[in-house]
Amino acid sequence: MPGKLMKIIKNCIKAVVLLGYRACIRIFPVRQDVILFESNLGRNYTGNPRAIYEEMVRQGLDKKYRCYFILEDRNTVLPGAAKKVKRTRFRYFFLFAVAGIWVSDSRLPMYIRKRPKCRYIQTWHGTPLKKLALDMDTVFMAGETGIEEYKKNFYDNAQTWDYLVSQNH
């Protein structure tokens, strides 16, 4: 019984947070000076999002833009002026609602909606020597019930990308 109650409470909290997120989309304008970075679902400061951000720091652009990195580990040291944001907290949703640029190497949750004035740079992750997305025959990922659902979700998510940076040649 306690497990069921916790699940109900979590679902209620999630519903309230998503309503808040949707309200932010309606109330606040997109800010072109806000850039939101995420690597490996907030688990690490790595990959192409890191490389793009560090090049911005090298060019001094981290002072021109308000940069945020979604990170679960608050102890990760970031160069430059970027601030850290924990995944699925209110600030996370607020920044997705107002950021003018998103840089991510993973699929975003389907409940995150890209606004027309926002630009989404998808940078992939991992090695180019593997089957990806629509080329896959099987899938073993949390939250996916089967390969067809995975492919549909991937396709729908890819429709939100404005740019794709890929290691594949």
Image (cartoon, rainbow, N blue to C red):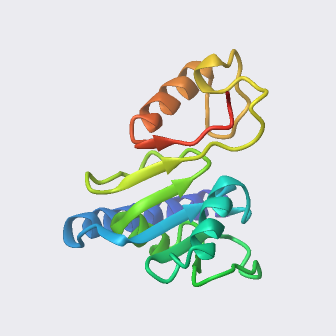
Foreground pick, 166 / 154: 166
Residue nearer the viewer, 162 or 60? 60
Percent across and percent down for residue 20 are: 33, 69
Number of callouts in the render? 0
Q: Residue 114 location, x and y as percent?
A: 35, 51
Image height of 131 relative to 167, above or below: above
Q: Position of residue 23 (x, y in %)?
A: 26, 67
**Image check: 58 left or right of 115?**
right
Q: Residue 65's quadrant in the figure?
A: bottom left
Tell me the quadrant of the picture where the N terminus can be found: bottom right
Coordinates of residue 39 in the picture (x, y in percent): 65, 57
43 or 13: nearer the eye? 43
Q: Residue at x 49, y 83 (%)?
A: 63
Mark yes or no: residue 90 visible: yes
Q: Is residue 1 visible?
A: no
Q: Kindly identify the residue that appears in the image at 38 percent across and 53 percent down.
A: 119
**Which quadrant: the C terminus?**
top right
| The residue positioned farthest toward the front in the image shown | 59
- Residue plotted at (67% across, 63% down): 50
Residue 108 relative to residue 105: left or right = left
Residue at screen point 64% across, 17% down: 135
- Write down the quadrant of residue 162 in the picture: top left
Q: Quadrant of residue 130?
A: top right
